[in-house]
Image (cartoon, rainbow, N blue to C red):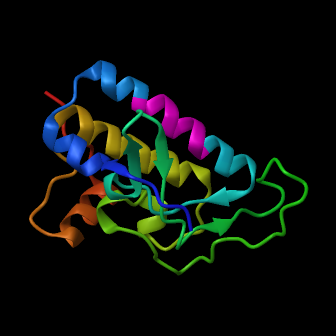
C-alpha cells in the first residue's frame, strides 16, 4: 500500500479555503473520479476524509474499501468484469450519500458526483448542505429536502 502524506479535505475545510483553491481541488478530484468511472469503478464513499491533498497540491482519492465495479454496459472499459452494486445494500458514510444510495438502490458514478458536490459545498461554505442534528436526519434531508442555500 502506498504511503501518502498530506492533509485531508476535512482539515482544509477548517482552514476556509478560497474559491480559487476549491476550483483547483474540484478539477483534480473530478478527474480522479472520471478515471475510476472509466475503469468501471464506483467509489461509494467520497467524503472529505477520503480525499488527501499532498504537500505539492496533488490530490489522492483514498479508501476504495466499499467500491464496486459498475455493470459492463455502464463502464467505458470492455475489460471490466460485471459486478454491480447490489440493491438493498447501504454502504458508505451517511452524510455523503446520494439519495439513491441512501434508499439502498443500485448506484453508479452519479452517486460519486453527488457526494463530490456535497464535499465542494462544504469546502466553500464550511457547512454541510443538508444540516441536521443526527446522521439519520441528514439522510432524511438528502432524500426529501432541498439543499440549504449557500448564502
Residue that extends furthest to the left in the rendered view of this protein: 133
When the figure is inspected, residue 22 is found, relative to residue 135, above or below; the finding is above
Question: Residue farthest to the right?
Answer: 78
Q: Residue at x 21, y 48 (%)?
A: 11
Give the vertical position of 6 relative to 56 (above or below).
below
Question: Which residue occupies 55% across, 60% down?
Answer: 43
Query: Quick one: which residue is furthest to the bottom in this view?
Result: 88
Residue 94, percent across and down? Answer: 32, 67
Which of 133/146 is in front?
A: 133
Predominant SS of the magenta segment: helix
Magenta stretch: give its range: 25-33
Residue 32 part of the magenta-drawn span: yes
- Which quarter of the image is occupied by the N terminus? bottom right
Residue 25, quarter of the rendered image: top left
Q: Is residue 23 left or right of residue 63?
A: left
Position of 14 with respect to 140 (left or right) is left
Q: Is residue 2 magenta?
A: no
The extreme top residue here reads 20
Q: Residue at x 62, y 77 (%)?
A: 86
Amino acid at each position: 500500500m502506498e504511503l501518502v502524506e498530506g492533509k485531508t479535505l476535512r482539515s482544509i475545510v477548517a482552514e476556509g479555503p478560497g474559491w480559487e483553491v476549491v476550483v483547483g481541488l474540484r478539477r483534480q478530484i473530478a478527474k480522479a473520479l472520471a478515471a475510476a468511472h472509466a475503469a468501471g469503478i464506483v467509489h461509494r464513499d467520497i467524503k472529505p476524509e477520503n480525499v488527501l491533498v499532498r504537500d505539492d497540491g496533488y490530490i489522492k482519492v483514498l479508501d476504495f474499501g466499499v467500491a464496486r465495479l459498475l455493470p459492463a454496459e455502464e463502464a467505458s472499459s470492455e475489460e471490466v468484469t460485471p459486478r454491480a452494486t447490489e440493491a438493498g445494500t447501504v454502504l458508505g458514510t451517511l452524510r455523503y450519500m446520494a439519495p439513491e444510495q441512501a434508499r439502498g438502490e443500485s448506484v453508479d458514478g452519479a452517486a460519486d458526483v453527488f457526494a463530490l458536490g456535497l464535499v465542494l459545498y462544504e469546502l466553500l461554505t464550511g457547512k454541510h448542505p443538508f444540516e441536521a442534528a443526527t446522521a439519520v436526519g441528514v439522510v432524511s434531508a438528502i432524500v426529501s429536502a432541498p439543499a440549504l442555500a449557500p448564502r
